[in-house]
Image: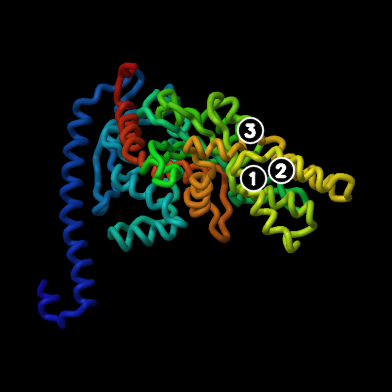
Amino acid sequence: MARFQAGQPNGVAVQELEVLVRTAVFKSANLMVGWLLQNAADQIDAAYQPKPGQHSKGRASTRIDGMFGSFPLERDYYYHEGKKQGHYPADAALGLESGYTPALARLMCLEGADESSYQKAEQHLAETGGIHVCGRQIQRMVQRVGAAAQQWQEREAKPGGTTAPIMYVSADGTGVPMRKEELARRAGKQPDGSAKTRLAYLGCVFTQHKTDEQGHPVRDYESTTYVSSFGSIEEFGPCLRQDAIRRGLALALQVVLLIDGAEGLANMGRLCFPTATQIVDFYHAMEHAGKVLVALLGSKEHPDYQARLGRWAKRLLNDKVEQLIAQSRKQCDGKPQAEAVEKELGYFLNNIARMQYGTFRRKGFFIGSGVIEAGCKTVIGARCKQSGMFWGEPGAQNVLALRCIHSSRRLGQFWLERLNAHAAHNDSLALAA
């Protein structure tokens, strides 16, 4: 205070003042938190009943890092010789994560998963909160908690949610760049047949209650939830179904599966969402329409290409996909390009029922998969596909699990269940069902 009052008042002085005041406040707050947690640890240790086989090894001291700084903590240690496992009852009860308070551990996970790198997470914590944790420690915390987050995504669902007129389920996959050892003996799209990426699946569930004045569907505000997986489509499908069950799959009046037309996703839909109306994303359909026209006309530079692509769009929106297939075959009948055109038409032949866009629009359905496309960019791409990044599968999977939980507005629920699970380690009796 004296230094500020004695100096020349300006922006630099004000900036220094606020940082110094924050440091002073944090010191007092840190002393208070440390004192309160030590008292709590003493009470926990006094009341703890060792489990069979556990033997007290006395008190052990450690340093705990929290939101306001670090402080020492004394607590009892028990060891089970048969299981070769140690246990600190106070650590479990207080929700400590490898020497970090639960509030700081949660913030480290949030920043580590949200920022584009662990180094930026370190810088952001220091600048915004005066919290000094190195990027490596943030990474370790993300991997520790992220593994549990992935399991939490895959947990068996308890039916819930509320009744919605329309529930949408959508899924897509995108490649995540991986380290060489992660790609050994994996086939890919490189000229030599090798792979540079691993396929990560992203799924989302959202609901719709209304359409706008023009009859266009309106997605319910903050209704989108996400799940991710590096597993096979056979493993990912049931995980996505569990999320839909949590969201009220059994209560939805209509279920719509929005996909890009890939056979793997279509088969997943048949197995995991057998009553859903499957719709191929209209923009993927138009992309493949362009490929048909290129095969038919020779290139996109053909003077008729744009006009004919527009006609394809209008006819697809009027349930004319079968007519388009027949006309394309007729136009190339007996011509050299017939085989190439037929190959590109296969996409439409396999998806005729999923391309009745006129019917779908009259029912007020979304016909575009923009939600999941955007999710692949924001949830996966923004964190895992930065320039120069190469991941290990566990590292990427754990980060994406935390990002999905955050994007789904479920951080509070996840951390509550995690803290309860920590506390449950102190029970000497089995928990009630």
Tell me the quarter of the image containing the N terminus.
bottom left
Please name the residue shown 49% across and 30% down the image: 255
What type is the residue that disc 3 sits on?
Ala
Pair 3/2: label in front: 2
Q: Position of residue 388 (x, y in %)?
A: 57, 60
Task: Tell me where residue 300 sits by quadrant.
Answer: bottom right
Residue placed under numbered mark 2 in the picture: 324
- Picture quarter with the C terminus: top left
Q: Earlier in the sequence, mark 3 or mark 2?
A: 2
Decide: few, some or many residues near mark 1? Use Cα within 10 Å; few <14, some 14-19, many ≥20.
Answer: some
Give percent across and percent down for residue 235.
57, 30
Contact (CB < 8 A) between labels 2 and 1?
A: yes
Nearest to the observer: residue 322 or residue 194: 322
Q: Considering only order in the chain, which callout, 1 or 2, is on the residue closer to the N terminus?
A: 1
What whole-number distance in Å separates the C-alpha atoms at marks 3 and 2?
14 Å
Label 3, on which residue? 353
Q: Nearer the viewer, residue 189 or 366?
A: 366
Residue beneath disc 1:
315
